[in-house]
Amino acid sequence: AAPLSRLALGVQPSPTLEMNRRAAELARLGRDIIPLSLGEPDFHTPEFVKATGMAAIERNFTKYTAADGTADLKEALADKLQRHNSIAVRPEDVVVGGGAKILLVAALLTILDVGDEVIVPAPYWTSYPELITLAGGQPVIIDAEVDDGFKLTPECLRAKIGPRTRALVFNSPVNPTGAVYSRSEIDALASVLREHPDVWVVTDELYEHIYFTDERPASFVAVATDLAGRIITVNGFSKGYCMTGWRLGFAAGPRAVMRPIASLLGQIQGAPSSIAQAAGLAALTGDQTFLEINRQTFRERRDVLVSGLSRIDGLRPHLPDGSFYCFVDCSRWLGSRTARGRLLTSDKDVVDALLNEAEISSVHGAAFGRSPFIRLSFALGVDRIRLGLDRLAKFRETMR
Ligand code: PLP
């Protein structure tokens, strides 16, 4: 074949999507896999949201919309950001796109030149380093310690930030650790950023509705309002609104960056789905009680999973304050052999063995920049979680 680009040759498939693919393949072969690798709520899209999407098709709302989103949706989003997140933005400073992912890429492409450094606290969502590299940037990983709740500290940020730093990618609640930054923790990071006026903050708040703290997670810009001129807030409908397959996300920030983001997306994506936008508008403006019901359900599942895991010899789960993931230290399992004689030398080995010998899918910590850990999702029913825990316990008992 004719040659491919260097960019294409360098790009890695998403390890989480890859694990879900492997698990789905085994399930198709009739194996009953417990999907603890899931990255989406098992809840269906709320009925009224689905009905609005169907009605949009019926009334032929099926054409291109404005490339950066419909006026109605942008207005509702500006209102949501103001009311819910204390972020003052006008509808013109909101851009709608086909999921948070494409908005993250567009934001990075808009602020990075080749070789610019972007700080990413680890453990991180698996796609950040890849997306930064695609946008020509250089990821600079800062390890957040378990003793700091897996959160970036101002001291570590100060030590790594420099003249080539162009952005910090911030995420709270964090995928994969479930860490939620408090207002004072965000404020401490903002103090460091004040010393570096050329550094952007790209803040990914996709899990904002899934939290177990007393207070809802704070938005970065709501704490650091004086830095609003260099903060891009990215969010979407996938997790809180259970709309992963609809592909709908949004970003907001200062006009000087949001207009180029809109132009860029207009060129490479075009308008996001008209149908998804109609449904998203309903999701935002309709009855919100499902958010609280889902949150309480996630909390119960979290408690079942974490207490079960802490009873399994050698596993040390980190209690998540948000998201639907538990990040589990599996270092004490390394050096042992599974019932089938496989030597566990890394978290990748653990994940592979769990899939093949215990029929559990999970994701290895290395995919999130921290080993030896595994990420277990609790986006599935309590009965399935309990079955998964039984299998994990049995796997441990038969290890040698
Ligand atoms: N950001 C984080 C932290 C995620 O976990 C995900 C999805 O797993 C995304 C962004 C992408 O979300 P979307 O489905 O809106 O593209």
Image (tube, helix red, strand yellow):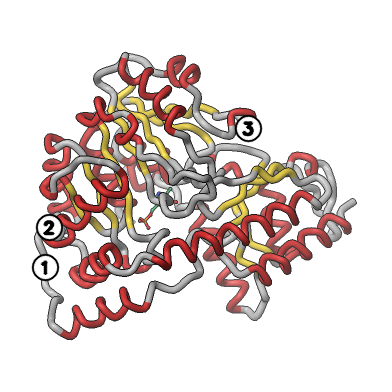
Mark count: 3
Q: Position of residue 325 (x, y in %)?
A: 57, 52
Q: Quadrant of residue 117?
A: top left
Q: Which residue does the image show at 69% across and 45% down from the upper left?
A: 317
Q: Which residue does the image show at 59% across and 46% down from the upper left?
A: 320
**Badge 1: residue crowd in 10 Å (few <14, some 14–19, many ≥20):** few
Check whether the beta carbons of the residues at disc 2 and disc 1 lie within 8 A of each other. yes
Query: Which quadrant, please, contains the N terminus?
Result: bottom left
Q: Position of residue 225 (x, y in %)?
A: 26, 30
Q: Secondary structure at mark 1?
A: loop
Q: What amino acid type should be assigned to the residue bearing mark 3?
A: Val
Disc 2/disc 1 C-alpha distance (Å): 8 Å
Q: N-terminal of the two: label 1 or label 3? A: 1
Q: Position of residue 297 (x, y in %)?
A: 56, 64
Q: What amino acid type should be assigned to the residue bearing mark 2?
A: Ala
In the image shown, does 41 or 81 lie closer to the viewer?
81
Q: Which residue is mark 1?
A: 64
Q: What amino acid type should be assigned to the residue bearing mark 1?
A: Tyr
Question: In this orientation, does residue 176 appear?
Answer: no
Q: Which residue does the image show at 84% across and 50% down from the upper left?
A: 337
Disc 1/disc 3 C-alpha distance (Å): 47 Å
Q: Secondary structure at mark 3?
A: helix
Q: Position of residue 229 (x, y in %)?
A: 20, 29
Question: In this orientation, does residue 138 appear?
Answer: yes
User: In this picture, is 301 found above or below 108?
Assistant: below
Q: Which residue is mark 3?
A: 146
Q: Quadrant of residue 86?
A: top left
Of labels 2 and 3, the one closer to you? 3
Q: Which residue is mark 2?
A: 67
